[in-house]
Amino acid sequence: MEIAALPELLPAWTFGFLLVVCRVGSAVLALPAFGEAEVPMTVKAAIALAFAAILWPAVQPALPPPPADAARAALLVVTECLIGLWIGALARMVVLVLPLAAQFVGFLLGLSAAMLFDPAFGASGTALSRLLGLGAIVLLFATGLHAVPLAALAGSYAVLPAGAPFPAGAAAEAAVAMAATTFGLAFQLAGPFVLAGIVFQLALGVMSRVVPQMQVYFVAMPAQIVGGLALMAVLAGSLLAAWTEAARGLLGGLPGL
């Protein structure tokens, strides 16, 4: 490449790099592990710029040239941001399975009175939900699954090239299907605790009939919490292993893989 050609190439390169940053940066805001609320915004920006710099040379030949009008340029930027947010949100739903299941379990264990702020849901949640939410992030890095959404982001340029219209219908369908899958998986993971809670409540009902003088509430609450935590200690390893296998399959189905 001749030095004289640089003034003609720099505008196209700059606009192409901007498009890559838009897709990668919007995805990083929603991706699990990288887009957590505890991660400073400067760190997220550095991650987005670093990954965009790595990805840009590979996708640069397929990037569209700078458009002549500002409206077309704005449309391209918005489309790239939507694609990145879509991929990041799909990956985020997979990680929310564990804290969502822990929310179910926390209510069954009687821990709903002890609430704290949960950045994953943007509202108050149980301590158990926060614990398993952090455990999901640790498992992502321990198993290498944190790199799967990044690979999907890089491969998305093959199925969703820059400059193509955003597939709103397919995106909505995929988001709804992923949400339904994650809710079903969360309830399946909480299934043993749901069954134990039903059996425990039935036993309390029978006991209150047999021994009407007993203060059921004061007996039930400590037994429910202690028994639930003991069951969690026994099943925690199996629960995390089951989520890891399910997450590997769900993340493997992201667009671009």
Image (cartoon, rainbow, N blue to C red):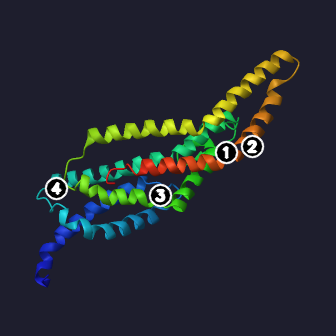
The image's mark for residue 235 is 1
Local SS, label 2: helix
Dot 3, crowdedness within 10 Å: few (<14), some or many (≥20)? Answer: some
Q: Earlier in the sequence, mark 3 or mark 4?
A: 4
Name the residue beneath numbered marker 2: 230
Q: Amino acid at mark 4?
A: Ala
Residue 137 higher or lower than 184, as above or below: below
Q: Which image quadrant for residue 126?
A: top right
Q: CA distance from mark 1 to mark 2?
A: 9 Å
Is residue 127 in view from this perspective? no
- Decide if residue 168 is in sight here: yes
At horizontal 43% and vertical 47% (from top left) the residue drawn is 250
**What is the CA distance from the residue labelled 4 to the residue labelled 2?**
61 Å
Tell me which numbered mark, 4 or 2, is placed earlier along the sequence.
4
Disc 2 versus disc 3: distance between alpha carbons? 29 Å
How many angstroms separate mark 3 from mark 4 (CA)?
A: 39 Å
Q: Amino acid at mark 1?
A: Leu
Whether label 3 touches label 4, CB < 8 Å = no
SS at mark 4 in the image? helix
Tell which tag, 4 or 2, sits nearer the viewer: 2
Q: Which residue is mark 3?
A: 145
Amino acid beneath label 3? Leu
Q: Which residue is mark 4?
A: 70
